[in-house]
Amino acid sequence: PGARRMSELAFETVESVSLTGAVCDAPAGCDLTYRYDLTPILSAVSPSMGRAGDTIFINGSGFVGTVADVSVVIGGESCLVTDVSTNAIACVAPLHDGSGPKTVVVSTSTGYSLPDDNVTFSYAARLGSILPAQGSIGGGTILTLVGEGFSMRRTDLNVYAGDSRCKITACNHTFIECVTEASNTSTAQDVDVRVTVGDVSADCVGICTFAYDTVYTPTLTNVSACLLYTSDAADEEDS
């Protein structure tokens, strides 16, 4: 059935649960009752923003069972449950991207909680370091960016070195590898490196600059014409 308002869940009975070609012979019948008092209800997540590995607390009601009976999913990823009471759950936030708020879903022995746009958890996107810190003005330097709240999907990410895009070749939640484009100037310059995850800009929590440097730029002075001889041609000249 589709999503229902809480007021509709108090005692709603499905007239029959059937399987094509099957006959109900259960002594208690084959009706199903949706009950509000058996539905896990979420009221808040604390803190509402954090990092992978943080312990978060989910407040609400109807959290029936033990740690083994309860599961929590944040944005499709499992949050390791460490403690459960009837009105609170503690779990350890999994790795995820910092593209925006993630839906929190609780499952108990009686079923799933309803999604609530006001009960979410957000991950901080942070850029901590860039290696190497300098490279060619002509581009082609492979950068390794280390941080958190990145994405497993390259399409979710953008990296810029100054005004030039850095082409992403590999990524996960904690690192990005990209290749610099040529600088927009032929002289040495230091530029800020920026990462966006979806529509969210990652915070810089370390040194987030890159130096386009002439020292690391191959310089061509001239091209001379030369003749290349094959071994057959050389044998003919010798004869």
Image (cartoon, rainbow, N blue to C red):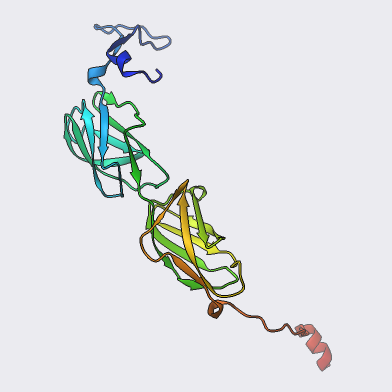
**Eyeballing the image, is 165 above or below 236?**
above
Query: In front here: 203 or 95?
Result: 203
Q: What residue is rendered at 35% in x and 60% in y?
A: 205
Q: Give the quarter of the image for residue 64.
A: top left
- Left or right of residue 157: residue 101: left
| Figure label count | 0
Q: Give the quarter of the image for residue 72.
A: top left
**Eyeballing the image, is 151 above or below 204?**
above
Q: Quarter of the image containing the C terminus?
A: bottom right
Q: Where does the image place residue 32, in percent across and percent down from the top left?
A: 30, 12
**Eyeballing the image, is 211 above or below 25?**
below
Q: What residue is rendered at 54% in x and 77% in y?
A: 216
Q: What residue is rendered at 79% in x and 88% in y?
A: 234
Q: What residue is rendered at 31% in x and 40% in y?
A: 78
- Left or right of residue 21: residue 237: right
Q: Where does the image place residue 12, in percent across and percent down from the top left?
A: 31, 11
Q: Where does the image place residue 206, in percent across and percent down from the top left?
A: 36, 64
Q: Give the quarter of the image for residue 26.
A: top left
- Left or right of residue 193: residue 129: left
Q: Residue furthest bottom?
A: 238
Query: In front here: 143 or 160?
Result: 160
Q: Quarter of the image containing the N terminus?
A: top left
Q: Where does the image place residue 140, in percent across and percent down from the top left?
A: 57, 68
